[in-house]
Image (tube, rainbow, N blue to C red):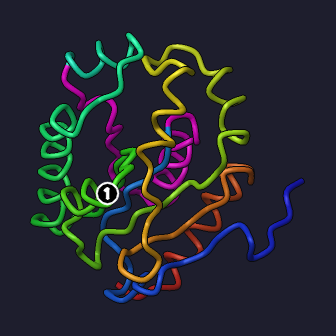
Amino acid sequence: MYDMGQDMVSFSHRFGEAGRPCVLIVMGVSGCGKSTLAQLIAERMGWSLIEGDDLHPPANITRMSNGIPLTDMDRAPWLDLIAGRIQSWRDAGQCGIVTCSSLKRSYRRQIGGDSADVCFVYLKGSREDIMPRLAQRTGHFMPVAMLDSQFATLEEPDMHEEVVMVLDVNAPQAQLAELACAHLAQLSL
């Protein structure tokens, strides 16, 4: 059993400054557990969920399936599509969750607009933590060999400037979802 101590969650200075966020973007490198955690949180909160990988154009999936890392130009239309979905929720006064690796700060700005009501839930772990998970995953287009390029691209969130909840990837996902939801529930709407 994982220790439920405070070391499994941390918050940026901007977390909660607008009350409870209306959009969560579950982020991190491939294989960190974004989809599972997002599903668990969506079920508990009753929020809509979009799997960001489902929005990739076929050319991006082909590149990644062949072990070719995406460029910023490859990612731009995908990130625009995610940003559009997020803005639609916000315009409609709805809450939602999207999974998106969000590896660079510029990507996070593009999809969240540095808004205080959009929170990035960062599943943080080392290559050694994530590699075994990725190696066991089946049915996904991202090969294990791409993990190094993900870590090379990763710019960890700025804990002073961005709205972030950081969760320890080594904790059980059900406990992480419960913890995330408990912290969100403490924030006023």
* 68 up-or-down from 36: above or below: above
Toward which corner of the image does residue 86 lie, by quadrant? bottom left
Q: Which residue is drawn at 60% across and 58% down?
A: 177
Toward which corner of the image does residue 124 lie, by quadrant? bottom right
Any magenta on residue 170?
Answer: no
Q: Residue at x 29, y 29 (%)?
A: 70
Compared across the picture, whether 169 is left or right of 55 comes to right
- Label 1 amino acid? Gly
* 158 up-or-down from 34: above or below: below
* 89 up-or-down from 151: above or below: below
Pick the front one: 131 or 163: 131
Any magenta on residue 49?
Answer: yes
Which stretch is magenta? 30-57
Pick the front one: 23 or 33: 33
Residue 168: image location, x then y, percent? 67, 58
Toward which corner of the image does residue 183 lie, by quadrant? bottom right
